[in-house]
Image: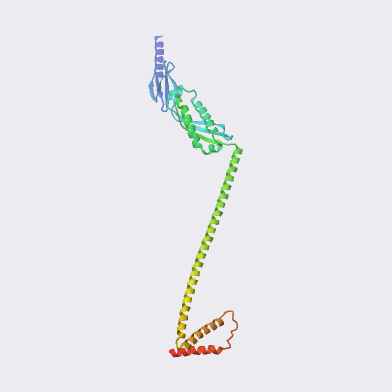
Amino acid sequence: MPGFIALILLAFITVLIYQSVVQIPQGYSYTLERFGRYIQTLEPGLHMIFPIIDRIGARINLMERVLDIPSQDVISRDNAMVRVDGVCFFKVVEPSFAAYRVLNLEKAVTNIIMTNIRTALGSMDLDEMLSHRDQINEKLLHTVLGATESWGLKITRIEIRDIHPPQDLINAMAAQMKAEREKRARILEAEGIKQAEILKAEGIKQSTVLQAEASKVAKFLEAEARERTAQAEQVATEKLNAALTNPQSSSALQYYLGQQYIAAFSKMANSAGSKTVFVPYENGSMISSIGAIKELFDQKS
């Protein structure tokens, strides 16, 4: 009998020793309660506690967790019904707060995020919802972070995963985008035609200016040529007058008139429209002029 009692006492002591040793894995923290009251948080490692009066309260996971936010219907400011879901990343930074200040931690986080999603998206138009997701995520994170701070949590990220408008709205938006693309295409085409007409007008303008400049230069050159011709004729006339005052003027005059007569007759004979050449009745004058020219050359030689 004493041996049996000793055996029972040994077993009891073994159980007490086993219960007094607590091993906590990495990534977890345990809360320690004495007579049901929280006294401290046990970090990862090996710890000794007092059996019977001490016990492990809550086992808190300190690793970052991913929480799926269920989809829900949200009415936008412009009365569009959309279906929204999201995802939240959080971790516990104060195990005692997470264990004793909130019941069912993940459910509480899920509900507060869903409520803030309805509040944030309900104050926006549908176009803003679809084009400002970063602003929505930042606003949700700021709001939820302040609300969950007393729970010993740190919300690292909140992301709106999907926004699903009704099918009729999707079709309307597709038609609107198609109309916008066609409008931009017509505007670009009109701009191209406008630029082409402007360039064409500029080309015509430049061509007209260049033609006017060329005509101006041509008229200037023509006037200059006429002026030089007039000057040459004036010089020739002066020389002719001087020759007439010379005693031998008759020979010079006959030479000049003979030259002009021959040139006019050659021009008339070589004309493309002339089929018949009429010799003047007084062709003796021409022959006499030619003879006078010959005599002049003979005298000079």
- Tell me the colour scheme of the image: rainbow
Residue 43 spot, x, y in % from top left: 39, 25
User: Considering the image in quadrants, where does the N terminus appear?
Assistant: top left
User: What is the x, y in percent for residue 18?
Assistant: 40, 19
Question: For this view, does 86 lie left or right of residue 93?
Answer: right
Q: Residue at x 59, y 43 (%)?
A: 176
Q: Quadrant of residue 193?
A: bottom right
Q: Which corner quadrant holds the C terminus?
A: bottom left
Task: Spot the residue most to the right.
Answer: 168
Give the camera-side residue of 169 and 273. 273
Residue extending furthest top?
1
**Residue 276 rendering spot, x and y as whole percentages:** 60, 83
Q: Does 166 appear above or below 96?
A: below
Q: Residue at x 56, y 48 (%)?
A: 184
Q: Nearer the viewer, residue 224 or 57?
A: 224
| Residue 230 vertical position relative to residue 194 in the rendered view, above or below | below
Classify 18 as above or below 246: above
Residue 260: x percent and y percent? 51, 83
Q: Residue at x 39, y 9 (%)?
A: 2
The one of 71 and 297 positioned closer to us in this rendering: 297
Q: Residue at x 47, y 27 (%)?
A: 148
Describe residue 55's horizontal placement relative to residue 126 as left or right. left
The quarter holding residue 235 reads: bottom left
Number of dots carrying numbers: 0
Q: Does residue 53 sit above or below 288 in this rendering? A: above
Which is nearer the eye, 109 or 138?
138
